[in-house]
Image (cartoon, coloured by chain):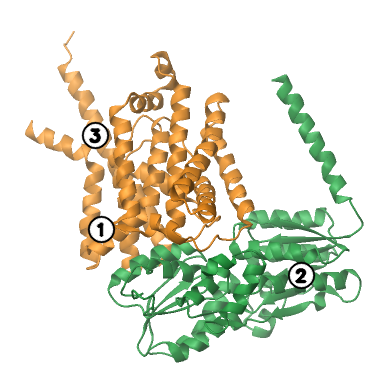
Amino acid sequence: MKKWKVFSAAVLSAAMLAAPMTAMADDAYRVCFVARASADTFAAWLTNEMKKAADQYDDIELTCVSGEADDAEMAKQLEDCITKQYDYVIVQSNNNAAQAPYVKAIADAGIPVVTTNPTTHQADLDGETGDPEVDNAVMAGTGTVDADPVAQAAVGAKRAVEEVPENANVVVFRGPSGNYHAEKRREAWDTYFFDVRDDVNILYEDYANWNNDEAMALMETWVQGGTHIDAIISMNDNMAAGAIEAVRNNTDYIAEDGTPSFLAYGVDGTAQGCLLIREGLLTATALQDAGEIAALNMKYAEAVLNGEMDYTEVNDYVDAPEINAENVDEFLKIYIENGEISEADLD
Amino acid sequence: MKNSKLTAGLQRFSIFIVLLVMFVACSLLSPYFLTPNNLMNVARQLCVGILLAYAEMILIVSGFLDLSIGSVLALSGVLAVSTYKSTHVMVLALLVAFLVGIVCNMVNAVFVAQFDVPAFIATLGMQQVARGIALYYTGGANILQLGKFVQLGQGMVGPFPVPVLIVLLITVIVWYLFNHTRYGRSLYAIGGNRKAAEASGINTKKSIFISYAIVGVLAGLAGAIFMARNNSGIPNGAVGYEMTGLTAAIVGGTSFSGGVGTVMGTVAGAFIIGFLENIMNLIGVNSYIQSIIEGAIIVLAVAFDIRSKSRKQTKQIMAVKDEAPKA
């Protein structure tokens, strides 16, 4: 027992000594990226891209932490950013309203703070006023680098207006309730598709919370309803993939030769989404490029830290290019280059 | 006499009565419920949950539990998928899944049996560790293009889905273990009273190690089936699945205080939850409302089951008192 205690004490002491030594390794600017969750596919991709982007700058030392999709954990991580006196903080909120006061506290502590994917708005802190100009403004004292969820979802929605057959029956898979990107993408589908095509019937609609397996279980049951589903409308590629997997062996939906009798729309342009487009099972998606978001974040971080601009001037949105059967191969190259898939996966 | 036999029978099979009532109610609520495709769907969707429920039942009966099973499932699943993608050998991929499950659960067993760490704490720690390793190994990204590995979750043998056949085989094995082996009987004894079990010569530590090893195999198998069903190696998959397993076992009559639980009861518990989820999806109930209804019905089903059993016990006690010779 005594040996255990001595061993534990030695390990703890070594860890405590090693931690500040790592932190004091050089005089680079200390930047912290607080990701929403390490178990979230996109957040994980964004974290990896942040690390790659930070490696391009000798004067930036990046620390990545994760809120694990838990608002209390996010609050702790954001408070720690003030305690540790980082030079610059990038926040990917889990729940905008819950994190807004902590983001403000970082700004109040004089630390430049930029919110990314999603943007924290003034309304997240103060509540909705009903004035879109006030509510949609980036939170005072912060900057943002983001992708526009409305523009992303509009890509598929506009295509669907032309492609979805008359009086079609569709199903809708939603992201988590209250999530800014989930809600805005759904709003975009209303604006650009359902308001235009009032002949279309929403057969089923439910929250699959960005998850492949939840969407799969829903779709498996929905197809038992007997009415043919003409289109899958999903707020991300992951859920679309789950829904497609549910009908992969169903000849009412995918013929023996692999031709689908349904349309499917996603958002994100993930590797899985691109592979499904190549297979002819996903009609279209819009890229949310984590690499571009990360590169922009680091570019602005360096500019702010070197006094070239004020962090409240950071306000940039990445494009949402459409990915479809015609151009999917060029996007697949991105994933082959970053190692997420290999050439062999395309066979 | 005839009436009391009937009542005793009803009480014994109360959970199956709940299941039957639910089955009839579901068939009245939706014309699609009774279609063979839908019933096969429910069975296929329940496969992973039933494997986890067996694992939890084995542990709960002997007075333990496993909160790490969802994370161990994810870790063993992604490593199995990764192995398959490198070798294209299904048996090897499955062996990796079993091995990972066993190793994780041997760590749990060491802390629980050797260091007397409460199972809740030991397995909570492993929950974090296993999930962390799965995410670190994959960099948080899904592993795609699984090739023929998907047959394990999506394949058919005649009219029967492969995972359903696997679960049927596992059901027979677990049922045999529980009802026809010394190990099975030792679990009930340990869960009823561990000290009394030790005093009667049962090697409780050995039983705990065997239980966690079996749980490891079940978690590994569930991981492989889960990934195959989703056609992806998903490191963040099966979050919260420990609750799926625990709920099915508890609804099926397994007592949290140990010593009580049956394989068929657990299957019934899993199907009660499965039918409930299925019918709510079929009639288009919003998933947040589903959660409320599911919680309420689960509590009511368990309350009905406990009440029936306590009545049975009271009657047995009274019968013993009546038969006892008067002083």
Binning the other alpha carbons within 10 Å of mark 2 as few (below 14), some (14 to 19) or many (20 upward) gives many
Relative vertical location of residue A161 with respect to residue B253 in this rendering, above or below: below
N-term mark: 3 or 1: 1
Quarter of the N terminus of chain B within the rendering? top left
Q: Please report the residue visible at 48 percent of the width from the left and 46 percent of the height from the top.
A: B92
Task: Determine the chain carrying the residue at label 3.
Answer: B
Q: Residue at x 62, y 49 (%)?
A: B132
Q: Colour of chain A?
A: green
| Residue that lies at the very extreme toward the top in this rendered image | B327
The amino acid at mark 2 is Val
Residue B318 appears left or right of A75:
left
Q: Are marks 2 and 3 on the same chain?
A: no
Mark 2 — residue?
A114
Given the image, what chain letter belongs to the residue carrying mark 1? B
Residue A309 position (above or below residue B268): below
Q: x, y (%) of residue B253?
A: 32, 39
- Quadrant location of the C terminus of chain B? top left
Task: For mark 2, give the secondary structure.
Answer: strand
Callout count: 3
Quick one: B66 or A332, which is closer to the camera? A332
In the displayed structure image, the side of residue A224 where residue B232 appears, left or right: right
Q: Chain of mark 2?
A: A
Residue A177, image x, y percentages: 52, 68
Say which chain is orange: B
Q: CA distance from mark 2 to mark 1?
A: 57 Å
- Which residue does the numbered mark 3 point to in the structure image? B311
Q: Residue furthest left?
A: B2
Distance of label 2 from label 3 (alpha carbons) = 63 Å
Tell me, yes or no, if residue A137 can be seen here. Answer: no
x and y, in percent, of residue A300 in the image = 81, 73
Nearer to the camera, B169 or B68: B169
